[in-house]
Image (cartoon, rainbow, N blue to C red):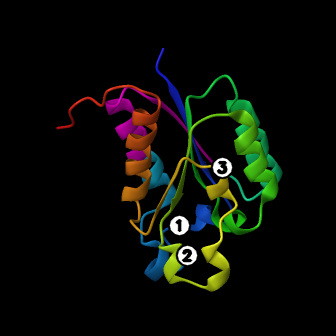
Amino acid sequence: MRPTVLVLNGPNLNLLGTREPHIYGRDTLAGIKAMVEAWGEGFGLEVEFHQSNHEGELIDLIHGARGRATGIIINAGAYTHTSIAIMDALIAVEVPTIEVHLSNIFKREAFRHHSYISLAARGVICGLGVQGYLLALEAVKGLIGQELPARN
């Protein structure tokens, strides 16, 4: 049985590829999912990929990771800057978490510079586009103490 990594995406990320491509790029969420799943397989990880525009649904998914998932990668979208509830859920499940953002949130509006998610995360990757998800997957693999296989 392969270790499971939960990849969560918050509000409006279902619109990737068409929503402000000058900020978020042209990759779709389905394309990102395919890449992350392929990399996960290469690392010997099972990837569960989800997106929701609803805070409570994201919290339920986080709660479901307790005792089952070995890591969480989360792009909480706008909930990054507002959701104490998601932060609390991440802290409560005690699963290594990496926060990801496609854009560099520190080069954007001032309200985006604060992240509640960061208070629960082991690390943050922002501004590297889709590559951020892949780096987060590598980070989770390292955090759970497994050697990374060589990639072709």
Residue 22 visible in this rendered orientation of the protein:
yes
Between the residue at mark 2 and the residue at mark 1, the CA separation in whole angstroms equals: 5 Å
Between label 1 and label 3, give the one nearer the viewer: 3
Residue 143 is left or right of residue 96, and the answer is left
Instruction: Reply above or below: 22 against 53.
Output: below
- Residue extending furthest toward the left: 152
First along the sequence among labels 1 and 3: 1
Residue 61 visible in this rendered orientation of the protein:
no
Q: Nearer the viewer, residue 14 or 131?
A: 131
Q: Which residue is mark 1?
A: 16
Secondary structure state at the residue bearing disc 2: loop
Q: Which residue is mark 2?
A: 19
Q: Which residue is mark 3?
A: 120
- What is the magenta range? 35-50
Rendered image: mark on residue 29: none
- Dot 3 crowding, Cα within 10 Å, few <14, some 14–19, many 20+: many
Return the x and y of residue 23 as percentages of the image width and height: 48, 79
Between the residue at mark 1 and the residue at mark 3, the CA separation in whole angstroms equals: 25 Å
Secondary structure state at the residue bearing disc 3: loop
Amino acid type for the residue under numbered disc 2:
Arg
Secondary structure state at the residue bearing disc 1: loop
Return the x and y of residue 128 as percentages of the image width and height: 38, 65
Amino acid type for the residue under numbered disc 3:
Ala
Between the residue at mark 3 and the residue at mark 2, the CA separation in whole angstroms equals: 28 Å
- Residue at 53% x, 67% y: name it: 16
